[in-house]
């Protein structure tokens, strides 16, 4: 008497596939989440005057790319370092940079 094995010839068991509705729902959720994480446009400038011309009604700040922070004029780290740039404060906030409280005079 021979017994039938649960596995087929390639060693895999036959399992029912998930319904297509579950896969479609997962794809929609992933696409929806990906669209929410789009970064806001940020225009970095090399010189302070360029940034001031770009946003005359806004305050110019110094972005620190490594720390993810921005510094206002009068702070000790304003315009310091090689890994930064000038930008408008509104654009910096919308792009995810946080205001630094370090070095206020």
Image (cartoon, rainbow, N blue to C red):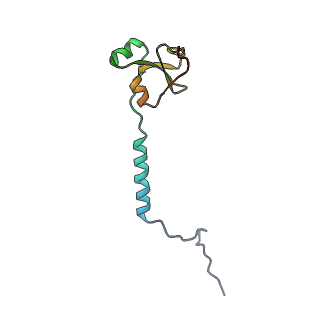
Task: Give the image location of residue 44, x and y in percent.
Answer: 42, 21
Task: Give the image location of residue 93, x and y in percent.
Answer: 43, 28
| The image quarter in which residue 45 lies | top left
In this orientation, which residue lies closer to the viewer: 51 or 98? 98
| The image quarter in which residue 57 lies | top left
Q: Please tell me which residue is depicted at 43% across the width and 40% down the height of the picture.
A: 37
| The image quarter in which residue 43 lies | top left
Looking at this view, name the residue that lies furthest to the bottom: 1
Direction from residue 91 to residue 63 in the image, left or right: right
Q: How many marks?
A: 0
In this orientation, which residue lies closer to the viewer: 76 or 34? 76
The quadrant of the rendering that contains the N terminus is: bottom right
Q: Please tell me which residue is depicted at 33% across the width and 16% down the height of the picture.
A: 56
Direction from residue 6 to residue 56 in the image, left or right: left
Looking at this view, name the residue that lies furthest to the front: 105
Task: Give the image location of residue 76, x and y in percent.
Answer: 54, 14
């Amino acid at each position: 008497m021979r017994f039938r094995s649960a596995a087929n010839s390639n060693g895999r068991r036959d399992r029912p596939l998930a319904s297509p509705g579950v896969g479609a729902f997962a794809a929609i959720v992933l696409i929806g989440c990906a669209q929410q994480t789009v970064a806001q446009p940020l225009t970095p400038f090399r010189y302070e005057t360029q940034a001031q011309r770009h946003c005359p009604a806004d305050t110019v700040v110094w972005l620190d790319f490594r720390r993810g922070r921005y510094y206002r004029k009068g702070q000790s780290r304003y315009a310091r370092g090689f890994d930064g740039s000038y930008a408008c404060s509104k654009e910096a906030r919308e792009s995810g940079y946080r205001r630094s409280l370090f070095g206020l005079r």
